[in-house]
Amino acid sequence: MSALVVLLVGLAAVDEGQLTQKVPPVTGEVKLANRVEVFASAALSFRDTFYRKVAPALALTYHFTDHIALSARGAYYFDIEATSMQVCPALQGCRSPTADELNGRAPGQLLMSLGGALEWTPLYGKLGVLSEAFGRVGLTVMLGGQFVGYRGAGGAFRPAPAGEAGIALSLWLTRWLALRLEVKDLIYPEVVSVAEQDVTQLRNQLLAQLGFSFFIPFTGGSAAP
Amino acid sequence: MRTSSLTLLFATALCLVDSSALARPEAEPTDLAGPRSTPSPKANQPTEDGTASPAAPETYGPEGTALLADRVRSFQAKPIIKRGRFALTLLGAATINDGFHTKLGGSATLSFFVHDTFAIAVRGGLWRVVQDQDVQVARQNFQLGIAASQPQWVAMADVEWSPVYGKFRVGQGITHLDASVIVGMGTVIHRSPELAFEAGLGLRFIATEWLAVNLSWLNTFYLDKPLVTAPALLQNLMSLNLGLTLFIPFTSPERSKS
């Protein structure tokens, strides 16, 4: 009889082992639908010729669903003379151009941008680092329109319509906070002075933007990241 | 005998009670961090009249992640095992750091995975230089010199380490990926071969057991000695690369063993 009891207890132990497998896994996702995202960031331009841009930027996004959102965004650009070229005045050594030499004569002197974008988030996933640390990430595609202001020929401020296309990668740190990296192309027509004549050129301004996204309300999702 | 029967019944009942407790999907785990509430398993499930029941309130403490740590993690089998396999990667590339000259190119990489997350590789590629519109503006408006390097070929020996593994939901399916760090050294040939070093990051999206889509950012730097000026200039070929990876053999020997 004692052996039977031991057998039953053993069977129950096996059963416990199987049942343990039924504990829900750590999963779920951060829900975005009906939440507002505030994205505060700094943008840095790349592939510049005459000016490198550094810009504080802000975006306000409303998520209609977990996948579709609409954002309003703006940035103010500080232009720094790029070092990718050297001016070589006669009887002087070559050196980087000064701000006065470039102002009004070199294209790409972007000052501000203001507009909106439609955002689509088709990818949501988990990343594991060395099978120890896990993070939740989302990939977003953005397409939008903006108005930009730049300093054109003669140093005058000129507005222009612009198109914007890019992708964003969000890494959720908590349910309401994410680290977000955007890479995008701002495309706009620019009037450039070439040999004293105004010429309209299409300019591709590539930007990398890194910052934090805050989601309001702070709760959302079926599991903590 | 009667005592033994009672003992048996008691033991059986204990086992059943214990099992039923474990069978509850939301059995409270031992919680050392304080009280919390968890979502009910029946939340949002249709009721008998077909309507959804309201979701149970969920609260999480500031230590939410720690509270979840006592749950059992689930792991899915990797769809691909790379250890002991070769990979042939074909990439198209464009530079992203030179506004005056766009460099377009392509490369082929042959890798061998010593471990599932570690590979050694050799890579050969070519570059062609395309002049952009700002060169004309610069020449017309300024008296300037643009230091333009004209790389033609590149040959590198790389090592690749993939510490990040992940999966993405795409529509109704799941796509797996790994992210890797790439470092290497070799040569860039323009007028003459120059010693070059390389560092980069790669993403590999797994399509099938033998095919993946590869996206990588690579920075190859080398010293370019201009023809006229004495000092050599450090050149950066910072490029985005997109292409396909073919794993050989088509099925993993490791999986075949298991």
Image (cartoon, rainbow, N blue to C red):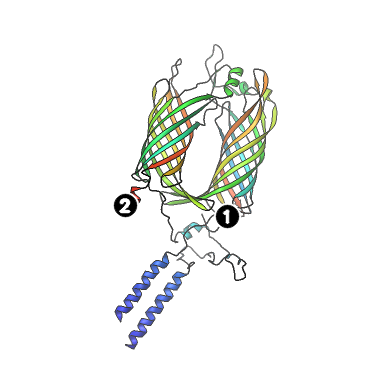
Q: Secondary structure at mark 1?
A: loop
- Among all residues in the image, which is located at the extreme top? A91
- Density class for disc 1 (Cα within 10 Å; few <14, some 14-19, many ≥20) is some
Q: How many marks?
A: 2
The image shows residue A41 at horizontal and vertical percentages of: 58, 41
Which of the two residues, B217 or A112, is positioned nearer the viewer here? Answer: B217
Position of residue A111 measured from the top left corner of the image (x, y, whole percent): 65, 32
Q: What is the quadrant of the N terminus of chain B in the image?
A: bottom left
| Residue receiving disc 1 | A31
Chain that bears disc 1: A
Q: Let me know if marks 1 and 2 both belong to one chain.
A: no
Give the CA distance from mark 1 to mark 2: 41 Å
Q: As displayed, is residue B207 above or below residue A188?
A: below
Inspect this view and state whether residue B63 appears.
no
Decide if residue A78 is on the left or right side of residue B71. Answer: right
Residue type beneath disc 2: Lys
Q: Position of residue A10 (x, y in %)?
A: 34, 73
* Res B228 → quadrant: top left
Q: Which of the labelled discs sits on residue A129, or is there none?
A: none
Could you say which disc has been placed on residue B257 in the image? 2
Q: What residue type is disc 1 on?
A: Lys
Is there any visible trace of residue A67 in the rendered image? yes
Residue B33: give x, y in percent of width and height: 48, 62
Where disc 2 sits, the SS reads: helix
In the rendered image, the vertical position of residue A194 relative to residue A189, given as above or below: above
Give A56 or B215, whichever is nearer the viewer.
Answer: B215
Q: Residue furthest front?
A: B250
Chain to which the residue tagged by mark 2 belongs: B
Is A154 situated left or right of B105 in this image?
right
Q: Tell me the residue at 46%/66% (across/down).
A: B29
Check whether the beta carbons of the residues at disc 1 and disc 2 lie within 8 A of each other.
no
